[in-house]
Amino acid sequence: MTSTARMRPARPADCRLSDLVDVFSLVSVGVDPASTVVQGVSVASDDVLPGELFVAVPGARTHGAAHARAAVEAGAVAVVTDAAGRDVLGDLAGRVPVLLTDEPRAVAGLLAAHVLDHPARRLRTVGVTGTNGKTTTTYFVDAALRAAHATTAVLGTVELRIGADAIESPRTTVEAPVLQNVLALALERGATAVAMEVSSHALALHRVAGTVFDVVGFTNLQRDHLDFHGDMEGYFRDKARLFAPGQARRGVVVVDDEWGRRLAAQAQIPVESVATHVDDPAAADADWAVVTADVGLDGVGSSFTLRGPDGREHVASSPLPGLVNVSNAALAIVLAHAAGVALDVAIAAVGTAHAIPGRMERVIERAPGRPLGIVDYAHTPDALVLALGAVRPITPGRLVIVLGSDGDRDRGKRPIMGQIAARLADVVVVTDENPRSEEPSSIRAAILDGVREVRPGLTDVHEVEPRAQAVRHGVALAGEGDTVIVTGKGHEPTQEIAGVFHRYNDRDVLLAAQAEGLADAAPADAAPDRLPGRLPDPTPDGAGRASRPGDGGDE
Ligand SMILES: CC(=O)N[C@H]1[C@@H](OP(=O)(O)OP(=O)(O)OC[C@H]2O[C@@H](n3ccc(=O)[nH]c3=O)[C@H](O)[C@@H]2O)O[C@H](CO)[C@@H](O)[C@@H]1O[C@H](C)C(=O)N[C@@H](C)C(=O)N[C@H](CCC(=O)O)C(=O)O
Ligand SMILES: Nc1ncnc2c1ncn2[C@@H]1O[C@H](COP(=O)(O)OP(=O)(O)OP(=O)(O)O)[C@@H](O)[C@H]1O
């Protein structure tokens, strides 16, 4: 099941519309709201259920008011919108109550929380924001919460999970009324604690309005989503909204970067700081600090020592490889502790947390004649550096990366991703990620521009599409001792091409490639630059064009 429609409490709410008018100072311009009862809230006409209130918000593509008629036909009993929306409603105000507010988007979550009797108040809630590490940290926090609560919920990019039941998540942080529905459903199912990811989009678009978190965490701020936030200052401002009294009671901030230090200094809620880089001067002033870290060479995890505010040192561990996961684990331990989990319980639970889909996920285990195959969600330059840095020490042979970059998103990072791949991996297979409305070949070309800056001759560089073929190609090029890391899509169940979502998952494709025995099909010593099927070289000296196996019919 992929729809959030079923993520609603079984017992519908029962709230008088006139209460909402009073509490939120709504201005009634349609049918008298006095006798209307509201059973839920929705901002999407195709998601609305009979008896619900439809909140018509102005959007980037359309005004929700243009879809209010469809919402009413689906059973919506009233409409909340703004003045611009009212102009679009036409004669609808003669059929149902219509209520005006200046900022319907800001009020949607508050309305839903009120209608559902504030589910977040009856749950222990932890929210995690930051450019990278939200998913990982949230799962680590969930592991710790599960050690102290019989039933928990975990909400984010990968899934919306309550206890053992999960559905695919449409986005990192769902729309405000959906979140309130999920929290109410979690309560109904006996959950007592929730860990969730809070994206910067969610903060800018009020998706967590109606939830005051018990504890919120910040991982880091790195270049991403500048298409939406404009610049790093705007991105930071949106993230910082989570650390405000109306949104959270207390915070835990990783102060490894300048943004974390600024956030810890300016937050208007009590904040505990965590320094996770050993020997970082910031550690001296931090409440919590990682003072030793041993990144195990087995590639499975790391152990570290966490110094607490009282000066005591605690031996802890991360079940995922790389220093970034020491950072995520340290943050998760402090978050869970701040949320009421005993420190030793949190440390033990985080250290044994299960694999997280698409996060440094070991899909093919290294074995005689077989490479290690990993799927990782790294899709920003910094994340890519860290992911490759974590994999290099556990790769006795060659490191093969299969990567692309998203369409309709930050274009500036494409050549940077190419440079990093060329610098830190031995073999680079450039392919498509989610091209969306863009021409896929132009995205690949931008990545290859970056690759070319590091490797002008494009040695061991391949351009392969479609993505599944690229993954197979990467596996075919790798042998015993090598590692194939497929980055960028992680757990994602689909690939978006020209507005169509195709079922696609890197893990499944990687497993299938291994099963198909493609590794055996390639000569054991097949160096990529010796594969047939290279395109004509564009440069006079014959350098600068990636090999394209698909075109050459060698596969
Ligand atoms: C910037 C952003 O998040 N936009 C999302 C938002 O767009 P919008 O509010 O501008 O909506 P719109 O399409 O103009 O429609 C306006 C209103 O009319 C409603 N409507 C529209 C059409 C219709 O038939 N019926 C209807 O009721 C919509 O539900 C909406 O309430 O609401 C739309 C409908 O739900 C989403 O499709 C759209 O997601 C866009 C496509 C998106 O990609 N969002 C991403 C960037 C996002 O939110 N990402 C973050 C994580 C990022 C990260 O950290 O990696 C996330 O939290 O997932
Ligand atoms: N603390 C961290 N600092 C930097 N990079 C990290 C960190 N944790 C994880 N990463 C890298 O970023 C990738 C994404 O990790 P994760 O999914 O946990 O982050 P996220 O914030 O949920 O990402 P998104 O918002 O894009 O879903 C990982 O695959 C890993 O390579």
Image: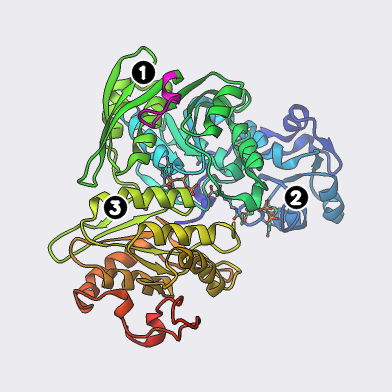
> Disc 2 beta carbon < 8 A from ligand 1?
yes
The foreground one among 410 and 211 is 410
**What residue appears at the point 27 percent right and 73 percent down from the top-left corner?**
476
* Span of residues in magenta: 275-284
Gap in angstroms between the C-alphas marked 2 and 1: 46 Å
The mark nearer the N terminus, 2 or 1, is 2
Q: Judge whether 150 appears above or below 108 on screen.
A: above
Find the residue positioned furthest to the top.
310
Residue ID for mark 3:
392
Residue ID for mark 1:
308
Q: Do the numbered discs 3 and 1 sit on residues whose CB atoms are within 8 Å?
A: no
Find the residue positioned furthest to the front.
541
Circle 1 SS class: loop
Figure label count? 3
Looking at the rendered image, the disc whose residue lies closer to the viewer, 2 or 1, is 1
Circle 3 SS class: helix
Q: Does the magenta run of residues contain 155? A: no
From where the camera sits, is residue 212 visible? no
Residue ID for mark 2:
58
Q: Judge whether 532 appears above or below 456 on screen.
A: below
Gap in angstroms between the C-alphas marked 3 and 1: 31 Å
Residue type highlighted by circle 2? Pro
Residue 331 pos. (x, y %): 41, 30
**What residue appears at the point 37 percent right and 63 percent down from the top-left corner?**
506
The foreground one among 370 and 83 is 370
Gap in angstroms between the C-alphas marked 3 and 2: 47 Å
The coloring applied to the image is rainbow
Q: Quadrant of residue 140?
A: top left
Q: Does the magenta run of residues contain 277? A: yes
